[in-house]
Image: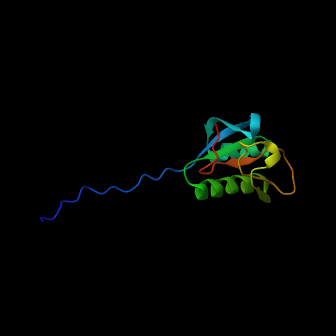
Amino acid sequence: MGRKKGGSTTAPVVTSPTIHEATRGSGGAVVKGAQLTQAQAEARRKAGLDVVVCGPSITANSALAQAIEANANGQWKRCPPHANAGPRALPHYQPDPRGPDGHTFYETPNRKAV
């Protein structure tokens, strides 16, 4: 048998996370709004508002969410989805101790903002 010619190999497309305004919906859902820069997200968090980091990589999403919360509010605490928030809740970072309200949510492969 002859040798098969290989097709061209392409590197997988790596998508960076995006940051969005967020509001909390029913069942713990996080509703994403307009896209933000990191600086805009940090200002929003300082004001006690929610943001959400979206993308395919849980590692990248979590790291960016942590950076936003740290830059906005200093010390932070990572929280899993709260069962009492509802079945569609997302993991998030929040100030520790609690200062301004709000959260920096992030998507996982199984939990997405709507």
When the figure is inspected, residue 28 is found, relative to residue 4, above or below; the finding is above
Q: Can you tell which quarter of the image residue 63 is in?
A: bottom right
* Residue at the image position 73 percent from the left and 44 percent from the top: 89
Where is residue 53? Give x, y as percent: 64, 47
Which of the 4 image quarters holds residue 60?
Answer: bottom right
Tell how many labels: 0
* Between 46 and 63, the one nearer to me in the picture: 63
Which residue is at 33% across, 55% downward?
A: 10
The spot of residue 75 in percent (x, y) is 80, 60
| Farthest residue, direction left | 2
Extreme-front residue of the structure: 1
Assign the C terminus to one quadrant of the image.
Answer: top right
Q: Is residue 10 above or below residue 40?
A: below
Give whichever of 110, 39 is nearer the camera.
Answer: 110
* Rendered location of residue 100, percent (x, y): 84, 46
Residue at position x 84%, y 57% in the image? 96
Say how the picture is coloured: rainbow
Quadrant of the rendering where the N terminus is positioned: bottom left
Above or below residue 47? Residue 99 is below
